[in-house]
Amino acid sequence: MNNPNSMFARAIPILFGALFLIGLVAPFAVYPTFLMKILCFGLFACAFNLLLGFAGLLSFGHAAFLGSAGYVCGMLVRDVGVTPEVGIIGGTLAAGALGWLFGVLAIRRTGIYFAMITLALSQMVYFVVLQWKATGGEDGLQGVPRGHLFGVIDLSNNIAMYYLVFAVFCIGFFIIYRAINSPFGQILKAIRENEPRAMSLGYDVAKFKLLAFVLSAALAGMAGATKTLVFQLASLTDVHWHMSGEVVLMTLLGGLGTVLGPLVGAATIVSLQTELADSVGSWVTVIMGVIFVVCVLLFRRGIVGELLALIQRAGIR
Amino acid sequence: MEIFGVPSALLGSQLLVGLINGSFYAILSLGLAIIFGLLNIINFTHGAQYMMGAFVAWIALNKLGINYWVALLFAPIVVGALGVLIERTMLRKLYKLDHLYGLLLTFGLALIFEGIFRDQYGISGQSYPVPELLQGGVNLGFMFLPIYRGWVVVAALTVCFATWFIIEKTKLGAYLRAGTENPQMVQALGINVPLLITFTYGFGVALAAFAGVLAAPIYQVSPLMGSNLIIVVFAVVVIGGMGSIMGSIITGLGLGLVEGLTRVFYPEASAVVVFVIMVIVLLVRPAGLFGKA
């Protein structure tokens, strides 16, 4: 019992179980739309964290995946008339394909160049969405119907919609959790820590990076597609670079490279934005900027990272 | 007179716009390259600092009665001083960490500056009058050249080449280049490297502000003028590679011209053409046109 790590390992299933139960009963205590927003952004941030926190790749263009999947899902559901689950799958696949394109180009450079390339590519996606008629330009895609899940369950009921979002989140989270705790995840960490070494051990570094990028993009897309159904809207803000910055902030604030950090960060930022939107108006951007600066200068481990460090220190003593 | 079925006046004026944009790309990517060389960070605040240069000039004119010519010197000094403050109080703490933290910090700062100006002035632009001396235009025969636009290109290129001269041909530039190669060694030789770093950041930022003042009479002075530009400049930097000063200048100008041509022949693509070129360069020559290895 003295080893904090083994204590910790035993606590994890209990923690996840408790969170799962909270997730099940939450819509009866809190406004479901608010919860759905948190879960969508939470999944988005977790997908982003897979890339930055575990593979050490800073993508500054993740809005492109969130947004394009949202548009694809919206067009499929509204204009083609498929059921919502097909829309989500379609959006996810589209984001994965886009992620492959981005990845093939961006992994040719590392570090800061990688960030700049992904940002530039996502800006290109932004202009395409802005100018293309099918995406509705400045208006975005409006009036996307939630439809009937599997053609049976009516999603216009907020509680039903919530459970779909919760299920999508759990699936996405499980995939990420499995990926992190698999040999694949270990190799990603090895690449993050020492790329030449990983290469000399015989790993095809480029292939693993690309795989991580596609997986992250697809899951970000899954979050985006689901978000479109929740709000019945796909808009330009979802593809704008501000959104790419926001997901970095959520991940950083919650705790880079921690499993639950991005969810905590997303919940904090979404609550903050909801709280502040009425009272301070355009100062929200300034406050986001200040949180960014404070996180980078003083709080690099993030909320969950600091908590973990605290627990570990207590365990050692 | 027509060239490729396009009236020469249209072609000429779009090429001029391209040349002006290219001059801004050149100054901004030059500043980014200098800062990156010594500090190893990408200055995301660069766009906001360009915007603040334009705003300082606008505020100086309307509140303090400072004219354009003084503002050309005054705004870079004010914004550069703010840059020095940022470097001394914040960036300095990050040099030992992963370079990505510098990018994140400057991104946060960009949000702060942009947000403050948006709160104060809204998103609609303010107009800045063209200085009296540079009003009007000349007829070149094949096109009409507004004098101010010609001046912007000349001024921007002069500053670019002056910067190139300082870095490549003077003692101070030699320190800077040596500091880029091996800061510990330069420090050991008795040169105050931290001061050099502060100076470099301030100078790079001042360049951005200078570009902002030049841009003020052409574009609307608006809080968002920098953020859209800076992403294109990032693509320019990826295309050119940050290894060479002259490379930054040539790439910036060249891409501006290509963008101008695109606006004549296929206007829909003009917003993305630089990004498309970036993709091609990444496929063919991943290190960038002027990059090493």
Image (cartoon, rainbow, N blue to C red):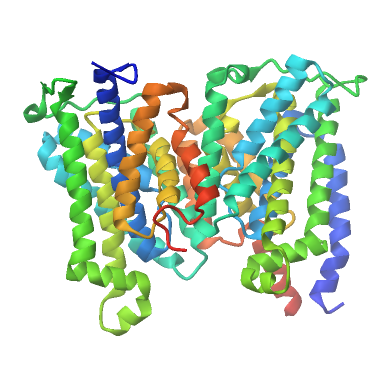
Instruction: Tell me the quarter of the picture where residue A194 sits.
Output: bottom right
The residue located at (15%, 41%) in the rendering is B71
Instruction: Tell me the quarter of the picture where residue A26 sits.
Output: top right
Q: Taking B274 as reference, is A18 left or right?
A: right
Depth order, front residue of B233/A160 = B233
Q: Position of residue A169 (x, y in %)?
A: 80, 41
Q: Taking A52 as reference, is A36 left or right?
A: right
| Viewer can see residue B84 | no
Q: Taking B253 as reference, is A38 left or right?
A: right
Q: Taking A178 as reference, is B188 left or right?
A: left
Q: Is residue A25 above or below residue B102?
A: above
Depth order, front residue of A193/A274 = A193
Q: Position of residue B21 (x, y in %)?
A: 31, 35
Q: Spot the residue most to the right.
A: A152
The residue located at (16%, 40%) in the rendering is B154
| Viewer can see residue B139 | yes
Q: Position of residue A248 (x, y in %)?
A: 58, 48
Depth order, front residue of A22/A174 = A174
Q: Position of residue A302 (x, y in %)?
A: 62, 58
Depth order, front residue of B285/A243 = B285
